[in-house]
């Protein structure tokens, strides 16, 4: 059997019919002046669709809440001009034969001082905490929570209206939804705080609201992680039993696919099993899953101790062998590719055609050259 067969086999996940198992991971770019995706953004995604990426997940797109954004030139998923820009992106990707979903995002307490569109707006989070020991912004009231839930629901409805093939909710990496999940940043004493199941309530309300707005058949992907950008060692669930308690309310709310973010997809999640986080999520929920983490790279992008951006990971074709094996074994349905696909729009085609010697080496490519 050709070792690439599973990776490039079509798959149907409900109404999401994909030509292969390669997913473009969401990667923030800050290339949308005035928060509007422009023709260059459309061309960027179209190039990946033309080169046989099965599913594109866009960079994070901010929902319509005053504190959702934390960085310059981030595209919004609200406002007539931004939505028109996204329609151009969607139409171009579809014309190239691809499928695309936006990642819906609220940064929470990560919001930087002076961020667009109103520099005077503080960060919002469950308890006013960015980390267990650092305050940044304000604790959310019930009215704030209701506003954000509505913002996610409306963003999903708008995404559906402009033609996206589904939506992904960003519940990972220490941003707002994950700040509710994380015991270190959620010190609330109401129904949104407490044990791990109670801390899922905010996310559950968001998924419920989206499902009510988009209907039963529109795909909802939910991205989560154990690690946080504030703390790589942080964990939501220490055991499979705890992970099941965490995931079950999200399944009940209407999540169709889980996107399980790890920094290295080959790492085992719990002792006693080789399954990664995606594999465990599939085992515990029965839902399709997307695995992710340093696909095609030698190591993680940033050394977690030194945080040294000079330690770029180069292309590592040999590391694809374990990917093929895990896909063949059915550990996960889809694999998200980030930096390797950022550096080389033709990555999927080159891997499919076994042209591994032609893969672009990230360590020899400047960020300014990546389009």
Image: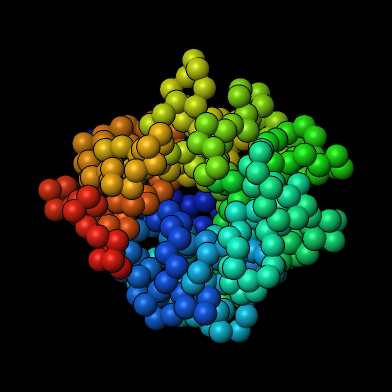
Q: Residue furthest top?
A: 272
Q: How many marks?
A: 0
Q: Is residue 175 above or below residue 345?
A: above
- Residue 128 % position (x, y): 73, 50
Q: Is residue 16 above or below residue 277?
A: below
Question: In the picture provided, is 240 more to the left or to the right than 339?
Answer: right
How are the residues colored?
A: rainbow
Figure quadrant of the C terminus? bottom left
Residue at image location 59% in from the left, 68% down from the top: 114
Q: Is residue 128 above or below residue 346?
A: above
Question: In the picture provided, is 245 more to the left or to the right than 307?
Answer: right
Figure quadrant of the N terminus? top left
- Residue 30 % position (x, y): 45, 68
Q: Quadrant of residue 166?
A: bottom right
Question: In the picture provided, is 341 more to the left or to the right than 133?
Answer: left
Q: Kindly tell me whether residue 203 is visible in this rendering.
A: no
Q: Is residue 316 above or below residue 69?
A: above
Q: Residue 203 or 120: which is nearer the viewer?
A: 120
Residue at image location 73% in from the left, 41% down from the top: 186
Q: Kindly tell me whether residue 221 is visible in this rendering.
A: yes
Q: Residue furthest left?
A: 357
Q: Residue 140 or 292: which is nearer the viewer?
A: 140
Q: Residue 334 or 182: which is nearer the viewer?
A: 182
Residue at image location 49% in from the left, 27% down from the top: 269
Residue at image location 80% in from the left, 60% down from the top: 144
Q: Residue 118 or 236: which is nearer the viewer?
A: 118
- Residue 270 % position (x, y): 52, 22
């Amino acid at each position: 059997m050709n070792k690439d067969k599973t990776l490039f086999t079509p798959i149907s996940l409900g109404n999401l019919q994909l030509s292969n198992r390669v997913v473009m991971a969401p990667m923030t770019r800050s290339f949308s002046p005035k928060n509007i995706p422009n023709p260059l953004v459309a061309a960027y995604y179209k190039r990946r669709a033309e080169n046989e990426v099965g599913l594109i997940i866009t960079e994070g797109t901010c929902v319509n809440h005053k504190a959702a954004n934390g960085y310059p030139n981030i595209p919004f998923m609200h406002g007539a001009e931004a939505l028109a820009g996204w329609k151009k992106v969607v139409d171009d990707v579809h014309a190239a034969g691809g499928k695309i979903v936006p990642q819906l995002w609220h940064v929470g307490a990560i919001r930087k001082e002076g961020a667009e569109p109103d520099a005077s707006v503080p960060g919002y989070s469950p308890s006013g905490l960015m980390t267990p020991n650092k305050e940044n912004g304000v604790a959310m009231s019930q009215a704030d929570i209701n506003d954000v839930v509505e913002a996610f629901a409306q963003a999903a409805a708008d995404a559906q209206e402009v033609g996206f093939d589904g939506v992904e909710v960003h519940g990972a990496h220490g941003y707002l939804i994950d700040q509710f999940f994380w015991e270190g940043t959620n010190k609330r004493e109401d129904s949104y705080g407490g044990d791990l199941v109670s801390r899922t309530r905010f996310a559950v309300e968001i998924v419920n609201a989206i499902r009510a707005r988009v209907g039963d058949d529109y795909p909802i992907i939910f991205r989560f992680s154990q690690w946080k950008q504030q703390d790589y060692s942080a964990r939501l669930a220490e055991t499979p039993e705890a992970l099941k308690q965490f995931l079950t309310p999200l399944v009940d709310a209407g999540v169709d696919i889980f996107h399980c973010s790890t920094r290295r997809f080959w790492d085992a999640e719990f002792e006693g099993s080789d399954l990664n986080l995606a594999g465990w999520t599939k085992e515990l929920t029965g839902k399709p899953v997307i695995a992710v983490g340093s696909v095609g790279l030698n190591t993680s992008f940033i050394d977690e101790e030194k945080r040294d951006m000079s330690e770029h990971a180069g292309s590592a074709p040999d590391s694809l062998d374990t990917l093929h094996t895990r896909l063949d074994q059915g550990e996960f349905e889809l694999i998200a590719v980030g930096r390797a696909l950022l550096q080389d729009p033709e990555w999927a085609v080159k891997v499919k055609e076994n042209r591994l010697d032609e893969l672009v080496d990230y360590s020899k490519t400047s960020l300014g050259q990546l389009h």
